[in-house]
Image (tube, rainbow, N blue to C red):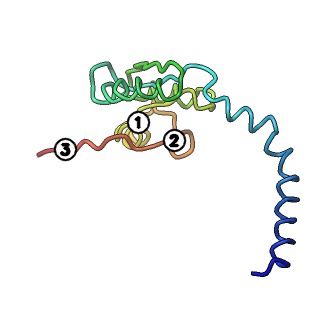
Amino acid sequence: MSRRNALPSLTRRSALALLMMPVLSSPAISVAQSFPSQPITIIVPSSAGGSADIIARVIAEPLAQNLGTPVIVENKAGAGGAIGMNAVAAAKPDGHTIAIGTASTLTTNPLMNKAAKVDPLKGLAPISPLVAIPGVF
């Protein structure tokens, strides 16, 4: 590549960078950088002491240290997990309320339980798989 061809592309890149400056310094970008702005709540849709509760409590402390904000584990048991999942779906969708979903709360309940008003495909957004617990016969 000759020096003559490199100069116009550098000028175009500089112009593009200057045009992007207002976009990159917009309030929307600064809001995204201030996450989290309040404590994170992990809702466990089962009673304390179960596998989902243990997983939530194991990840809460490192999550709090990495994010620099308190992480609260809140058990909302009842209706086969529907009460907890309904609470997560009703929360403000700002990322400060998350849930530990299980196979029953995400697949079986929406099909078989009238109390489960949440369609997991439409009302929830997945973050990450945490664990796989094998069944043994």
**How far from the left and from the top, in percent, is residue 114?**
45, 33
Q: Nearer the viewer, mark 2 or mark 3?
A: 3
Gap in angstroms between the C-alphas marked 2 and 1? 13 Å
Quarter in which the N terminus is drawn: bottom right
Which residue type does callout 2 highlight? Asp
Query: Which residue in the structure is indicated by mark 2?
Result: 119
Query: Which residue in the structure is indicated by mark 3?
Result: 135
User: Is 33 above or below relative to 69?
Assistant: below
Q: Which of the marked residues, 2 or 3, is nearer the chain's N terminus?
A: 2
**How far from the left and from the top, in percent, is residue 101?**
41, 36
Query: Which residue in the structure is indicated by mark 1?
Result: 101
Q: Is residue 136 left or right of residue 40?
A: left
Which residue type does callout 1 highlight? Gly
The residue tagged with tag 3: helix, strand or loop? loop
How packed mark 1 is, by other alpha carbons closer than 10 Å (few <14, some 14-19, many 20 or more), is many
Gap in angstroms between the C-alphas marked 3 and 1? 17 Å
